[in-house]
Image (cartoon, rainbow, N blue to C red):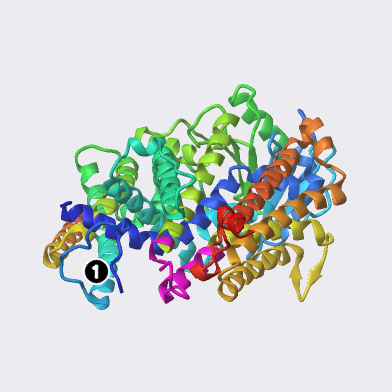
Amino acid sequence: MESSFRRSMDWLHTWAGVLFASLLFAIFWMGTLAVFDREIDRWMMPMTRLPVVDQTVSVDQLRPFLDIAAATKSPNWSVTFPTDRQPVLTVNWRKGEERVRHYVDPATGVLLPDPGSWAGTQFLYPFHYMLHVKLWDLGMWVVGLAAMGMLALAVSGIVIHRNLIADFFTFRAQANPRRSILDLHNITGVLGLPFHVLITLSGLIIFFANYFPTGWQAMYPTRDAFNADAFGTYSRPKLNHPGSLVSLDTMMRDAQRIWKGGMPTQLTVFHPGDAAAYVRILRFPEDRVMHHPDSVFFDGATGDLLQQNSAPRPVMTMQRFLSGLHFIQFQHWTLRWFYFVLGLSGCVLMATGLLFWLEARREPHASSAPASVRLVEGITIGSVTGLIIATLAFFVVNRLLPLGMTMLGYERTALEAWIFYLTWLGTFAHAWLRPPHAWIEQCRAIAGLALAAVLLNWLTTDDHLFASMASRTLWPVAGMDLLLLMGALTAWLTAQKLRSRTVPASPRHEPLSVAESQALG
Amino acid sequence: MTRQSATPDRDSDDAVEPSWLALIGRVVLVIFGGYAAAAGFVTGASVALPLIGMVRSEAVALAAMLGFVVYLVLLLWGFAERRLWRLCLGLALLAGGGFGVGSLM
């Protein structure tokens, strides 16, 4: 007789699973895509498929944008310099509540046509950590709760596991669906366990000051004061009267001298146009896990060095290291691909968990499933295949909408997002209206949409698979097309397998066996 | 509502089956009360650690990072602990003690 602790962990795993699995699938799915968010950007914004350059244009050449930002009273203005994964130069500032973003060719300084897409870095990636729900930071809080749920699910899952070692090697694909689903759930859970736990805990740790604000609130008067102490950020208020800014290129050269040649990642002007304007130049070294930039701060009016940051203290170093483990922005392609595969395994973990819950409660000879099963099945289909369909629709519509398009007052960027959400809603409706066929039909839809995306990239950009595989600049596009094709194949094979599994409900309609039909004939 | 477990071939447990209301009450208590207790821990540790020499910002960061582990333990305990009064007492002590130490600042 197992202990009451084991039984309560069993109960917790089941109910936390049913409650959080859909949400966790979405978080893991978007997070997995975010591993390659910059590559997705290249695919969705063809004008940014530029070769990497060694020398970028002078920052002072971009001053006209700074003047616009100052005129619209933006609190800051940034230039992000090109890297190998993001070969364009971006200029950003705020106009009221809106964020303005322009893409510039780094070799010539020419403004690129507005891509009109939030793509991977502005849509898929933020969805991952805040679900695009900004009201009261609810999205961030819900993701945090789901992350705690994930940790509780991981621990309870281990506790109720009967045979941890044997399950490393057990996958009975030919057994009845319940058995093979559970086997797959156990394999992805056990083999991926270090990743699932670390990625979840590190994700929470990134936002430690947001999730547990009472700590710094007890010790500091403001968040800025805490940030200054912990992260070494410099800040000063504006004076509210106009001032001038000396040469930014000189500051860039000073910064590079301090860093012994290291190329800056980002330059930000705080309080543009104000007499108290100051400039921060950041450099994120790609050769270390710790996600902490070297930074230098310059006075805007004189160009004097205000502050230069040294390495953080031990505990904050640990926090930056764990954050870096999660962000995986450092240069390590093998590990990045590992994260992608493990992230997908996490998605499989949640989907198989839900499927097992459903199969364990389905009565084999009843005419229809109980209400609880129908409800959870509808949610599962919409959350799993439905979310994938919505993502693919997002990619497809990106290739179809003309640049600069607006409709009903919505910009092209928002229209793409609308299609994502409307498609997603549609998949839930489809799941509830056509329960016996929904899985198969949605798998087929995934295959069709993924294929369409690859074809549309070919038709709209001429960077078809053979061209993109041959050119290093276009490898991100090749990678995306290849993964789309693999996804299409997987979805189509899954649909075929599901079709062959549908057995007749009543024995009376069972087809004759080969032997029986031969005996009759 | 059937209390089906993740592996339904096992015996269902022999404890008294709680009502829907008691269940939701327990979930709310564990999630929100557990968070309050963990936040109390974070506050208390953020205030107490500098008193023994740790740098302020380091203490805050360490307390918050440990806070997630503390919250996890409370979540697991919250659903494993059969006696409701013990759970309430434990959460209240941690929250009260933690925020109490915090108010010394």
Q: Find the magenta span and give its range.
A: A359-382
- The image shows residue A461, relative to residue A310, as above or below, that is below
Q: Using the rendered image of the protein, determine whether residue A466 is visible from the camera's viewpoint.
A: yes
What is the number of callouts on the image?
Answer: 1
Rendered residue at 15%/52% (across/down): A1
Residue B43 shown left or right of residue A135 in the figure: left
Rendered residue at 45%/46% (across/down): A184
Please, what is the dominant secondary structure of the magenta stretch? Answer: helix
Q: Using the rendered image of the protein, determine whether residue A229 is visible from the camera's viewpoint.
A: no
Question: Label 1 belongs to which residue?
Answer: B26
Rendered residue at 62%/30% (across/down): A255
Residue A521's quadrant in the figure? bottom right
* Local SS, label 1: helix
- The image shows residue B52, relative to residue A180, as above or below, that is above
- The image shows residue A328, relative to residue A63, as above or below, that is above
Residue B94 location (% of width, % of height) = 18, 57
- Front residue of this view, candidates A202 and A83: A202
Residue B96 location (% of width, % of height) = 17, 61
- Front residue of this view, candidates B35 and A18: A18
Residue type (three-letter) at the residue carrying disc 1: Arg
Residue A384 location (% of width, % of height) = 55, 59
